[in-house]
Structures are given as structure tokens and as C-alpha cells.
Image: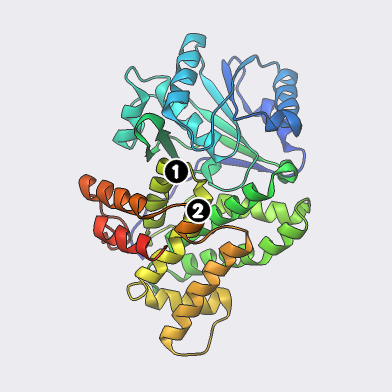
Amino acid sequence: MENFIFQNPTKLIFGRGTIEKLGGQIPQGKRIMLTFGGGSVRRNGVYDQVTASLRAAGHAFTEFWGIEANPTVETLRKAIAQGKAEGTDFLVAVGGGSVIDGTKLISAGLRYEGDPWEIVLSGRAKGETVPLATVLTLPATGSEMNSGAVISRSETHEKFAFYNRNPEFSILDPEVTYSLPANQIANGLSDTFVHIMEQYMTRPGQSRVMDRWAEGLLLTLVEIAPKIKADPKNYDLMADFMLTATMGLNGFIAMGVEQDWATHQIGHELTALHGLAHGATLAIVLPALLRTLREQKGDKLVQYGERVWGIASGTRDERIDRAIECTEQFFRSLGLATRLPEAGIGRETRDEIVRRFTERGVRFGERQNVDGEMAGRILDNAM
């Protein structure tokens, strides 16, 4: 296991009825801006719960609506301008990962004099930032308990990650997930599964603790996914889903071990070029990446196949084949495509991603060997 420093400052407030605690968690006198996506929080009652809690605690607040899935810097510039005009000094993101990610850029941009896209390109917030909290409505990204965010730029069809600050606190009430559409649940399960795999699917023997923790989260997803499909308003199932998504990307399973993240980098390009939902891109890319890098990841694939899918017999190659097949079938069981043509994506997109990776000189993966040429091979295996 490698040396590491671990700290996660986010306070997690979890369970039924916890949104009413929101107002009491924010210091008095703050100029609060609430940030939202579309209108779903009005329909499911979350908006009323949030605003009632703030008013009961004596807080005044303003609102910004319209942060889209795959939040764009074009929209967030407007939020930053509004926040600067209003003197905002505390943010509350009410929504899923996209709203939270977008709010992290607002937090960084409110005290920055340049264009917020410069922050994204630099990879990290610059100087002072504004504190934020979250009320999570869609389990998927883990953004409610980490510092990362991914922002798109519509005018150039680009999408990049940057890092700001962790939320001060996050409120997770599983009951708010009951109104989610089936496709959003499927994408959230896919996103969570691949977050865990990016930190786990490298090589064995680095940490028994991290391996077993990651495998436990993967097993939980495999167990609950079909049950959620049959009973999406089951509190215990949705509580497990919500907590697994948070634990999958809050740093707890990444301590001292190698990480990959090539699947995400390729997936971001598919989203930037086609607007495909993030979880949908990951379901296509991960099985293809595993097929392409099966020798490099072979030992871990055998371990994963045995511990997660119960594959304990056959030759090494047969066990690897079955582990990859089980992974692809898991995504298919969610109703997601696992091949590019199924999503209407052809070779011109493959060639553009290769061009972008090559032009930027990037190298991803635990061995830093996923460059433009390797990305092309992965995308070939997704055809």
C-alpha cells in the first residue's frame, strides 16, 4: 500500500425527514443562494421542504434555476454573475450530481475575477471560494461528499474535471428518490458501479482493506439493482443505493491504491460530443476497456470474477472472459446499451476522440498507457 493522507470534511446527514435539518446547519446571517436543475424538485416536494426549513431557521435566500445535466459553463456564468450581484456567501445545491458539480464551479467563480472556464482548465479552484452544502436528490456521482466536479463547454463540445472544496454538509433522504425515472436510476447505478471499478480494477495485492471494501460495494449494487427495478419505492433498497453511491467516491476506497479513470475520460468525450448521459457512456466504455486491457488487468479480473460474480472454475482466460461478460450483462440488465452503435455512435466519433487525446498528449489509466492510440483500440472494442 502506498503512503497517503486522508481527510473528508463533509458532514453526512442521512435518513428520513432530514431535509428539515437544513436551516439549522447554516450559520445565521449568510446570504444564501439555492441552486437547482429543472422543475422535478417542485413536483416531488423537495423544494417545499428546503425552503420551509430555511424560513423556519430565519434565513433569507435567493434562487438560481436551470443547471442542466452535464452542467455547462455558459449557464454557470449566469449563476456566478447573479451571485456576485447579490453578495452570495453560502450556496446550497438541491439536486443530483450535475447541480452539485455546477455549484462547485459557482463557489469557485464567485471570488474569481476571470472567466470560470479558466478555473476548469486549470484543474483546481483559485484563491478564496464560497462554502456550499447539498441536498441530494439523485444517487450517482458521489459529488455530495467529494471535491470533484465535471463541467462542459457547449460552444467547443468539451468536458473536463476540476477540484474545489468539499461540501460543508450533505443531506441524503432516500425517500426523495421515489419519484426518479427508471432511466435515471439505471444511469446512477452504472455511474456508481464504474466509480468503484475505477479505483479497484487495477492490480491485486495493494490493500486487502480497500479490495474487500470495494468488492462489498460492488456486491451490494449487484444484489439491489434487480430489486430496485422491481420495487423502486422500497426505502431500505434506496437507502443502500444512496449510501453506496456516496461511499463509492468519497475517498474511502482509494486510500493507498492505484486508480484508473480512463473509462471516465473516454466517457466524458462521448458526452461532450453527443450529449449522452454520463452513466450511459460508462456502460459502453468499461466492458470495452476490460476487453482491451485484459492481460494488464488479468489478475484483478480473476479476483473480481471470483469474489463478485462467483466465478471459481475454468482456465484463467475463461474466468476473465466470464468476468467481463458478467459486467456487460449487469449493464444490460439495467436497460443500458453496451456498444457504440446501439447509441447511434460511429467511427467518426471514435476518430475524433483519438485526435483529441493525441493532440492533448494525455495518458490515462493506472499505468498511464491509455493514450490516443489505446483509446482508439478501446473504442474499436465497443463497436
Q: Secondary structure at mark 2?
A: helix
Q: Quadrant of the C terminus?
A: bottom left
Q: Secondary structure at mark 1?
A: helix
Toward the top, the furthest residue is 85
Residue 238 position, x and y percent, is: 71, 52
Q: Residue at x 59, y 39 (%)?
A: 96
The residues bearing labels 2 and 1 have C-alpha atoms spaced at a distance of 10 Å
- Residue sitting at 37 percent across and 25 percent down? 116
Query: Residue reaching furthest bottom?
Result: 314
Answer with mark 2 or mark 1, whichever residue precedes in sequence.
1
Is 30 situated left or right of 379 in this image?
A: right
Identity, as a three-letter code, of the amino acid under mark 1: His
Q: Which residue is mark 2?
A: 343
Vertical order, 205 against 76 (above or below):
below
For this view, does 179 lie left or right of residue 313?
right
From the image, which quarter does the N terminus lie in? bottom left
Disc sitting over residue 274 in the figure: 1
Closer to the camera in the image, 249 or 179: 179
In the rendered image, which quarter is residue 241 located in? Answer: bottom right
Left or right: 381 with respect to 122? right
Q: Is residue 234 above or below residue 86?
A: below
Choose top left, top right, bottom left or bottom right for residue 347. bottom left
Counting other residues with Cα less than 10 Å from the Cα at mark 2, is it few (<14), some (14-19), or many (20 or more)? some
Which percent across, then down, holds residue 328? 52, 67
Circles 2 and 1: CB distance less than 8 Å?
yes
Q: Is residue 367 above or below residue 319?
A: above
**Is any part of residue 167 visible from this angle?**
no
